[in-house]
Image (cartoon, rainbow, N blue to C red):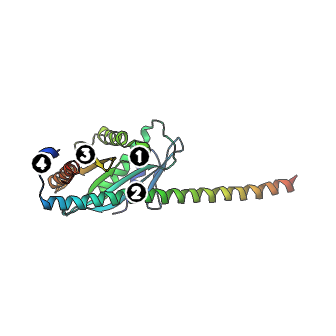
Amino acid sequence: MKPFDLFRINSTSPYKVEFRGEEYVFETDYDIRYAVWFEEQPLPDIDVMAYWLNLTNRSQKNSPGDVKIRQTVICILEEFFRTNPDVLLYMCDSANDQQAMRSRLFLRWFNAYGQQAEYFTCTEMVKDGDEENYIALIVKRSHPLLREIIEMYNEEIAMFRANKP
Amino acid sequence: MMEARTMTFTAEQWARHEKFVEMFRAAKRRKQEWQARRIKELEAEEEYARQERARIDAIFKDLDDEAI
């Protein structure tokens, strides 16, 4: 993955973002530390590079409502797509069994920012064993393989639900 | 979103799905491992910072005592 331009992120981000130990980290006004990191994920049978987006609260305490977190994460994601025109997959953190809430929140964040015109976003719940998992897909609408990527995602989700006979 | 109930899949699609599920589970596992490793690293950093603060406080305390 191409490295991000921290100067560009910090020119618009409300919280100062730093790169530390392979992660982008920031600390909120409420002393809560967040980490954002990306992990490369080649997709099976399609010539597209995807990345898992990981976003986590490192302070092990709940954050009060804070719009600056959303704005900071969006700045990081915009920089991701500026430097890496690829696919993002997001698996919600399952801590405290709050995946569904996190999934909704994440897409609300992303879409509230007026991104629908530029990005295709979708989130689906799949069950792996007894655990509910939410997988979100974010891809630029200008991606040359947009249709194939969406088809693949939909098909994989449908197969997760169908369960192999 | 395709309706799973109304769909049938080929062996080839199932083979790809198997790869996808493996990939997904591996990503979940790596995420948990990464989290655990980073939490340990942060705890170690915080412990180091705490010890350094204590060491520096002790130096200044000694200096204050000498001043008195």
Residue indicated by mark 4: B7
The disc placed on residue A33 is none
Mark 3 against mark 4, which lies toward the viewer? 4
Amino acid at pointer 4: Met
Q: Chain of mark 4?
A: B
- Which residue is at the front of the view, A62 or A162? A162
Examine the image and state in which quarter residue A99 appears: top left
- Identified at 65% across, 55% down, the residue is B50
- Identified at 19% across, 51% down, the residue is A159
Residue indicated by mark 2: B31
Which quadrant of the figure contains the N terminus of chain A? Answer: bottom left
- Give the residue furthest to the top: A65
Q: Chain of mark 2?
A: B
Residue A13: percent from the left, percent from the top? 42, 47
- Identified at 57% across, 56% down, the residue is B43
Q: CA distance from mark 3 to mark 4?
A: 23 Å
Q: CA distance from mark 2 to mark 4?
A: 32 Å
Can residue A60 be seen at all in this image of the molecule?
yes
Q: Find out whether the residues at labels 3 and 4 contact each other: C-beta distance under 8 Å.
A: no
Residue indicated by mark 3: A121
- Which residue is at the front of the view, A153 or B52? A153
Examine the image and state in which quarter residue B1 appears: top left
Q: Find out whether the residues at labels 2 and 4 contact each other: C-beta distance under 8 Å.
A: no
- Give the residue furthest to the front: A165
Amino acid at pointer 2: Lys
The disc placed on residue A72 is 1
Q: CA distance from mark 1 to mark 4?
A: 41 Å
Q: CA distance from mark 1 to mark 3?
A: 19 Å
Q: For the residue labelled by badge 2, is the local secondary structure a helix, a strand or a loop?
A: helix
Can residue A84 be seen at all in this image of the molecule?
no
